[in-house]
Structure formats: structure tokens, C-alpha cells
Image: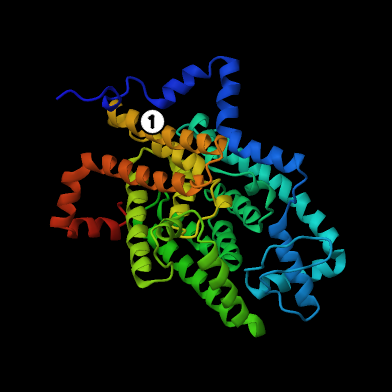
Amino acid sequence: MKLPAWLHTPTVDALTWFERFTQRKRNLWFFSLFFLFPLVGNLVSRLTKARYWLPDFDAVLCAAHNVSHGLSPYDLTPVCDGIRPTPFVYAPQVAHFFAPLETVFGLGGTRWAFALVYAPAMLWLFWYAVLKPIDKAPWHLRLMTLAAMVGSVISCGNIGLLLHALTILAALQMSKSRLPFIAMVICGALVKPVFLTYLVVLMLENRPFIARLRTFGLSMIIGIAALATLFLTAGTFSDEWRHTLNAIVILEQPGIGFFATTSALGLDTASPFTLIALAAFALCMGLAGLTLAEWGGLNTEERIIFGLGLSQFLNPRLMDYDMFTLAPCMAMVILMPRPLGHKAFAWISWAFTATLVFCVVCNILEVRVVHRAPVAIFAYSLIVLTVAGLTAWPQRQRIIGWFRNPLPVLQDILAQRV
């Protein structure tokens, strides 16, 4: 039986095709604008229609204003003069932290001060996502990932973006010291607890496994202890905070990651079945990450960059503004099958391309039924697991040997030989 033409292995992989296509300056512009269209188009629309900017930071400001006046920071329809806040969902301690700034500079002054810090942070994130020189993460593939983003990622003013920028900056200095990275992740987790997933980077470093495990375990214990302290010292607003978390974070805004998939399937994000499935998914993605870090041909810095992206898959409530670290990570993943042969690399690269072309087309046609980011994250997850499987397959005899006789491997790990 003859296969349809579209099922035959492509003669050229997507990366090679785009590299040839963009050799002409006109085509380079077309390529860039096509995949940036959802992001740029949304931003232009916001500018021309004078839509509001930084509403997420307004939530922090309004909460700080309220607690400084003895009022609750938790209101599902918050109102503060001169700003348009979204509901505040962070710990009450975060509102108390910003209260002195709001008292001194006022709502408007603090907002402008944040904007002055926020703008360079956004430029840093875009440089890291697309422009930072990384041999095993071609810029073509990295730029394409922006097709899954929306303009509100930039205009929302979410404090998480500033935390991501600082975490990435600390991670790139890990060759000198890991302490700033660990401290930044734990501080970020006090605002957004899912930031603890960043600690998986410590497990993917180019170091003996037992040393990685020791650093990761100790850091995770400190992080969990810090979060426990945060919950225990939330004070009089503790119950309201938990109610807001349940109403907005869990029910209304499941994000674009694992919880988005379970919500689309009609599953309760807090149900035992969903949480068991989350644990299984996290385990699979963690093992896939270890496989690709060990056998994917990455150097020391590339393993850290890969880990920064992989950690986002372990965040069940991934949001649009968490996607910047995925750009270089996914570019690396797409390139990893290349040594395994043309067929695997071609199919993986075109599957990745098809996903992001689909995102752009849905945006152009204004298809509201399809949410681009969850589709892209779901496809990314499948690609990571597939590439990890392809990478592990040539090592299958060694892996089988480990299961049959794990003692020599354990001895090597304890002796820090692996």
C-alpha cells in the first residue's frame, strides 16, 4: 500500500528550510513578522485603542494601599483611585512589603517606579529568549515560539516577569555561585510558590549526580520551609487569601499548562485523580529532562538554560508570562534528534513548526474557540517526551542493565563517578 505524499519523510528539515528561506532580507522580514504577528498585533491594537497597561501590578499596588489603611487586600472586584487593578492573589505579606513604598510615593509614583524597572526586565527577557547567542538553540526556532504568546504578556505588568528576569540572571551566574540562584528562586516562591520548580535546574547541572541531589534536596527543604512559614504567618487575612486562591488561581484561571489540559477534559484541578496524574506527568517530564541533559550533547551553560525551560513544564499552573524560558529550551530539544538521523529530526522540526504556524493562523483568523498557548504547551510536552524517548533508545541496553543490576550504578553515584 502506497502512503500519501504528506506521510513521506520530508526531504529537508524545518530549520534548514527556514535558514535558506531567510537568506533574503525580504524573506527574513516576512518570517519574523509572521511568527511575531500574534504578539506585535496585540500590542499595536492595545496602543491604537488606548487599552490599559500594567493592571496586574495595579493589583499589588491597590492591595498595598488597602493594608496600609487597615483594609483587606482581597476583593474580587478591587477599586483604587486612578488605577484599574485585577484581583490580588498573593500572600498578604506581599501587600505589606509594598505598603511603605505606596505610602511614600503614592499609587502613581510607585507605578512609574515599577515601570522604570519593568521595561529593562522585559528587554532582558526578550534578549534571553531570542537573541542570546546559544550554539544549540538557533534563533529561528526561538523566535517561532513567540507565536504562542499574546501582547498582554508585555502589557499586564505581572510581577512574575520581573522575578523571571532576576532568576534567569542569577542562573547564568551559577558557574561562579549557586547561592544567588537558590536565594532568588526561594524569594520568588514567596510571591509565586510554583517558582520552586526552577530548582530542577540543580538536578540537570554538569556535576556528579550525588552532588546535584544533595544541593537540590537541601534547597527544596529550605524552600518548602519558607513557604510553610509564609502560610503560618499570613495573619488575619489568611482565610481570605485561601478563599481567593481557590476562587481565582484554582477555579477561574487554571493557566496554560497541565491544569489547562485537565480543565479542558472536565477534571477538577484539585481532585485526587488530577493530582495523581500531575505527579505522574511531573515524574515523566523530570526523567525526560535528565535523559536529555545527560545524553543530549549539551555543555555546562546549555544544561542550565535547558533546565530553566524544562522547569516550566513542572509548573501545573503555567501562565503566558512564564513562557520566555521555553524559547531556548525548545530550540535545543528540536535540535537534539539531529545526530540520530534525518528522519527523526525532520519530523520533529516540522511538527514543532506546524504547531506554531497553527497558532499564527488561529490568531489571524481570530479563532476564539482555540487557545493558542495551551495547544503549544501540550505539543511541546509531547515533543520533549518523544525526543527523550528517541535519545534514550540507543542507550536501551545500558538502561536494561541498570535495572537488572543497579548495585554498580549506585556505587558509581555514591563515589561521585557519575
Q: Position of residue 125 (x, y in %)?
A: 62, 44
Q: Which residue is mark 1?
A: 350
Q: Position of residue 86 (x, y in %)?
A: 68, 63
Looking at the image, residue 326 sits to the left or right of residue 410; the answer is right
- x 24%, y 60%: residue: 410
Work out whether 336 lies above or below 176.
above
- x 40%, y 64%: residue: 214
Work out whether 298 lies above or below 110.
above
Q: In the current view of this chain or complex, which residue is farthest to the bottom?
A: 236
Looking at the image, residue 208 sits to the left or right of residue 403; the answer is right
Amino acid under disc 1: Trp
Relative depth, front residue between 215 and 295 = 295
Work out whether 38 lies above or below 211.
above
Quick one: SS at disc 1? helix
Looking at the image, residue 257 sits to the left or right of residue 187; the answer is left
Dividing the picture into quarters, in which one does residue 104 lie?
bottom right
Q: Could one spot residue 131 in this view of the protein?
A: no
Q: Could one spot residue 100 in this view of the protein?
A: yes
How is this picture coloured?
rainbow
Relative depth, front residue between 206 and 92 = 92
Relative depth, front residue between 210 and 153 = 153
Q: Position of residue 184 (x, y in %)?
A: 59, 60
Q: In the current view of this chain or complex, which residue is farthest to the top?
A: 24
- x 57%, y 82%: residue: 232
- x 56%, y 50%: residue: 320
Work out whether 271 lies above or below 344.
below
Q: Position of residue 103 (x, y in %)?
A: 84, 70
Relative depth, front residue between 48 and 180 = 48
